[in-house]
Each structure stands twice: as C-alpha cells, then as structure tokens.
Image: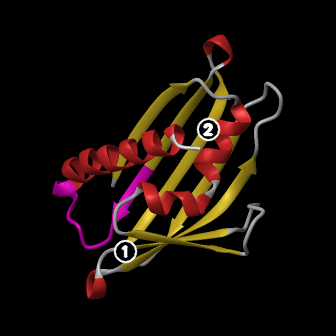
Amino acid sequence: MANFLLERTVPLPLDEAWRRLTEWPRHAAAVPLTRIRVTPPEPTREGTLVIARSGVGPLSFDDPMEVTVWQPPGDDSPGLCRLEKRGRVITGWAEIEVRPGPGGRARVVWREEVRVRFLPGVADGVLGRTARYVFGRAVNRLLRTA
C-alpha cells in the first residue's frame, strides 16, 4: 500500500478548480494510456462509478472507482470528493479537496492510498513515488487547461 499527498494553489475560483478536477472524461487526456467511462453519465453524485481503463491491448485493466462523498464547493466553503477504488487489480481510495486559498485562489489537496494486488509490499516505495509523479503531472495538466 502506498500513500501520497499532492497540494497545489492555483489562480482559479473554487468552482472552476473543482470542475477541472471532477469532470472525469478530462482525466483520459491527462493520464497516458487511459480511457474513462462514467456510469450513470453526468451529473456526478454519490454512487457514480468512474471506470478508468489503463494499458495497451491484453495488458489493459479496469480501475473502477465509486464516488462515496460528493460535496461541491460553495461560495467560500470547501468541496470534497472521495472515490473508493473497487478493482480487481487496484484498490484503495482517493480524495480531492478544493478550498479557499490565499488571495482568492483555490487550494487543491489530493490524497490517495493505492494498493496493487499481487505487488509485494517491498515495492510500496517505488509504487508511491511513481503514483505521486504520474498523478502530480495529471493534476497539473487538469488545472492548467480549461
């Protein structure tokens, strides 16, 4: 099991930072070799299933995630989304929090715990560093592009 934390402060209003991070199909462009399906389609709510299909050909797998907390931000109140990873290969959870930051900017906190079945615990350090790098780049890209 690997845990990581990403924090960003961006010159965006809360609702725009939230939209950029939780518009699930946009994640396909931000994470290499990934396609996204959402069931049921928009709007997202508790119970929504986000399925990321990652890999190439026979080395592909689904990473189904269920939205278990969905609290969009208000005028000056933070937003929180929690996804429970329910896959056969990847388990764990992810939380996306968007809250007011300094100078009217948005503060983004992304927390994640990821487990890859059949991967020995000795590989957790590499898994954590790799996940932090991949998701860090994805979060940066999602926040940069409208």
In the image, the segment drawn in magenta is 113-123
Mark 1 or 2, closer to the camera: 2
On the image, the x and y values in percent for residue 57 come to 29, 86
On the image, the x and y values in percent for residue 85 come to 51, 65
* Image-quadrant location for residue 32: bottom left
Which residue occupies 39% across, 58% down? 31
Between 95 and 75, the one lying in front of the other is 75
67 on left or right of 25 = right
Residue position marked by numbered label 1 in the rendering = 89
Going by the numbered disc 2, the residue's amino acid type is Glu
* Image-quadrant location for residue 40: bottom right
Asked whether residue 120 is drawn in magenta, I would say: yes
Which residue occupies 52% across, 51% down? 94
Location of residue 35 with respect to 107 vertically, above or below? below
113 on left or right of 67 = left
Q: Are marks 1 and 2 in contact (CB under 8 Å)?
A: no
* Image-quadrant location for residue 38: bottom right
115 on left or right of 84 = left
Which tag, 1 or 2, sits closer to the chain's start?
A: 1
The image's colour scheme reads secondary structure
